[in-house]
Image (cartoon, rainbow, N blue to C red):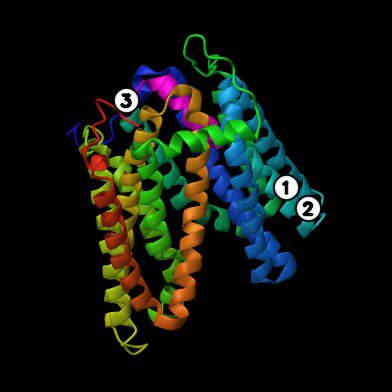
Amino acid sequence: MPRLFADLTPLRVSAAYRRLWLGNTLSFVGTQLTLVAVSLEVFALTGSSFAVGLLGLAALVPLVVAGLYGGAVADRYDRRTVALWSALVMWLTIVGIAAHAWLGIESVALLYGLTALHSAASGINQPTRGAIIPALVGVKLLPAANALNMMTFSIAMMVGPLLGGVLVASIGYAWTYTVDVVTFLAALYAVWRLPSLPPQREEGEPQQRLGLSSVVEGFRFLGTRPNVRMTFLADIVAMATAFPRALLPAIGGVILGGGESAVGLLLAAMAAGSFLAGLFSGTFTRLHRHGLGTYVCILVWGAAVAVFGVVVWWGSSLDPDDGRLAWALAGSAFCMAVAGATDSVSAVFRTTILQSATPDRLRGRLQGVFVVVVAGGPRLGEMIQGGASTALGEGLTLIVGGVLCIIGVSLLMRAQPGFLRYDGRAPTP
């Protein structure tokens, strides 16, 4: 049984990682509360879905810019210091959002500004936190640590949005934001307790200068290291061709006839699949063929999305009062759960390759690129899937997207077959 469930060894052997994991668990849930509550408040103030969409843009642009530059900062200064100050800025923005609600200011522009500032600080904090993990647990335990991190994120994605809606309805915006203010203190405490973590440099290597050249150096390294580069390319292909989130409102609310609750079910199913992958991560964290594992996961992801499309296409042919629509919804939820699980396992393999095969002096910058890809890939996929659905319909768009995902990642592996031979016991960038 211990080989079935999540490997808790990183939590047992590293007190620093244990504190960081527990702090992140609380803060991730709190962050999801705030994201949901801010979206609801912006809609309440404007009555405009477009205004809510602009909130996403206000968060994405600073995250992308700060993610690239923040990785360079993490490779230049003590990572504990960088993580602590960026986390403190994130906390202060949450305090600002809570104060906005308590004082009844009702300024959408201020909410946009605070959201952008929080996202920029997160763009620095996330790559720094990713670069810290290898120093806390060692290379051997990276798969287990990354699986635990992924389980934490999936819990937040399941619990946060649901709890956020309930709290806003029951205790209001101000108290909901205050919950995040309090829970985020756990993450601040965990970072504060970390030891000094300066980037490790080779003997005689000069300290890097902070600037655009530092960011370019990270991309130059990526351009000459095929295995690390493949972790990004494979994820971009998977997200750009077959990320279904933009289609879920039409699928759940119209085609399958379940309304907003059906959309919530499909989103929750994807998060649940991710959580189950983390819970039973003992089945894959001891595997060493991380490149092959990534390929298989993306193949299954594409197949799950394609089957989801078949179910939706079938459901679109049924009458609104046909009882078989319930089976179509259940089948769709199952496909989303499989997709969520395989995406999480792929993320564990890809993150482990990135962290173990990248020199410590460059880990922050490569983690920054990872943050940008993780944030931007799904957005690109939403644009492509949403645009294609106007011509093909939702079901056929999912089928085509899933098939293109399988073909695209297979072509990548054909172009770089060495990735399939990657062995975690001998990391080769």
Asked whether, in this view, residue 321 is left or right of residue 120, the answer is left
Q: Please tell me which of labels 3 and 1 falls first in the chain.
A: 1
Q: Are dots 1 and 2 in contact, CB under 8 Å?
A: yes
Residue at coordinates 66% horizontally, 27% vertically from top-left?
A: 85
In the rendered image, the vertical position of residue 323 relative to residue 6, given as above or below: below
- Give neighbour class at mark 1: few <14, some 14-19, many 20+ (Cα, 10 Å): many
Mark 1 lies on a secondary structure that is: helix
* Mark 1 and mark 2: Cα distance apart in space: 6 Å
* Dot 2 amino acid type: Leu
Question: For the residues marked 3 and 1, what is the alpha-carbon distance in whole angstroms?
Answer: 37 Å
Judged from this view, the residue extending furthest toward the left is 1
For residue 310, the mark is none
| Residue ID for mark 3 | 141
| Residue 132 is inside the magenta segment | yes
Residue identifier under label 1? 114
Element marked by disc 2: helix
Magenta-colored span? 126-141
Q: What is the quadrant of residue 72 in the picture?
A: top right
Q: Nearer the viewer, residue 176 or 263?
A: 263
Picture coordinates of residue 198, whole percent (x, y): 55, 16
User: Is residue 139 visible to the viewer in this orientation of the structure?
Assistant: yes
- Ranked by sequence position, the earlier of labels 3 and 2 is 2
- Amino acid marked by disc 1: Leu
133 horizontally vs 107: left or right: left
- For the N terminus, the image quarter is top left
Say which residue label 2 marks.
Answer: 110
Rounded to the nearest angstrom, the CA distance separating label 3 from label 2 is 43 Å
Q: Does residue 46 sit above or below 1 in this rendering? A: below
Residue at x-position 23% and y-position 50%: 296
Task: Specify the amino acid type for callout 3.
Answer: Leu
